[in-house]
Amino acid sequence: MIRLQAGPIDVPALVDATRGDGDGALSLFLGTARNVNAGRRVLFLEYEAYGRMAEREMERIAGEAVDKFAVTRVSIVHRTGRVTIGEASIAIAVASPHRAAAMAACTYVIDTVKTTVPIWKREHFEDGAVWVE
Amino acid sequence: MTVRVLYFASLKDRAGASLETLEIEDGADVASLWETVQARHPGLREMTTRPLAACDLAYASWDQPLRGVSEVAFLPPVSGG
């Protein structure tokens, strides 16, 4: 499952869609909106995506991870629009027969998503908002 | 020929638009299109570093020719995750 979506991520559904009966490991990463950055209180986050390119890039990264780590399946879901503190802005699930490959692939996917997928975060503070870049 | 130009995040704020359609010369490349849009938008002129660019949904180099390209996006450094 690769997608951008505006509402909260259904994590159990994501796990079910990713894991198969041949998988002994499911590695899950959730990036969550935190209430502080560099000492300033953050009220909420907002994400903007170049949607068509972002989905294409996420597909590419997932395929690359499957090839590179020989895992079974990689799912990536990223939020767009407003994300409340505590909610997940991104969920990555990797299923594999064994844990080492699943965990390594999960790290690779989040690191690569953060450097190449065209999505931008805007932090909203009490006195204004800034794009993080 | 015409090309659709897209701006995102802080670049959208600087350009004051998210999308425009521009007429470009044969032989134009990403770098010359950036000069064209900087001339049109004072907010983009203030930038001292070049943004990332994508042509038809793939990252592009600055010397990529625009012949046959229908959409160019200018992108600030990404910050998803």
Image (cartoon, rainbow, N blue to C red):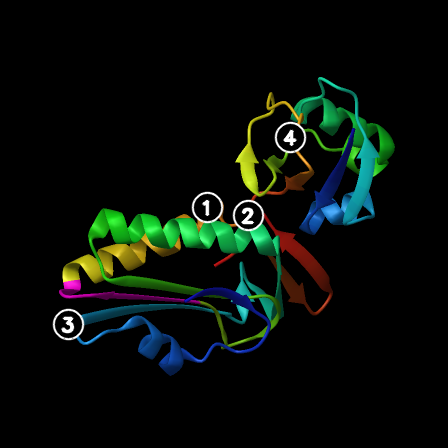
Q: Chain of mark 1?
A: A
Question: Label 2: which residue?
Answer: B78
The amino acid pointed to by label 2 is: Val
User: Can you tell which quarter of the image residue B14 is in?
Assistant: top right
* Chain ID of residue with mark 3: A
Q: Residue at x 62, y 43 (%)?
A: B76
The relative height of residue B5 versus residue A31 in the rendered view (above or below) is above
Type of amino acid at the residue the image marks with label 3: Gly
Q: Is residue A93 covered in magenta?
A: yes
Q: What residue is rendered at 41% in x and 67% in y?
A: A1
Task: Tell me the chain of label 4.
Answer: B
Q: Which residue is mark 1?
A: A115
Placement of A50 over or under A34, stated as above or below: above
What is the spatial separation of the Cα atoms under label 3 and label 4, in whole angstroms? 46 Å
Residue at horizontal 59 percent and vertical 24 percent from the top: B64
Q: A37 left or right of A71?
A: right
Q: Amino acid at mark 1?
A: Thr
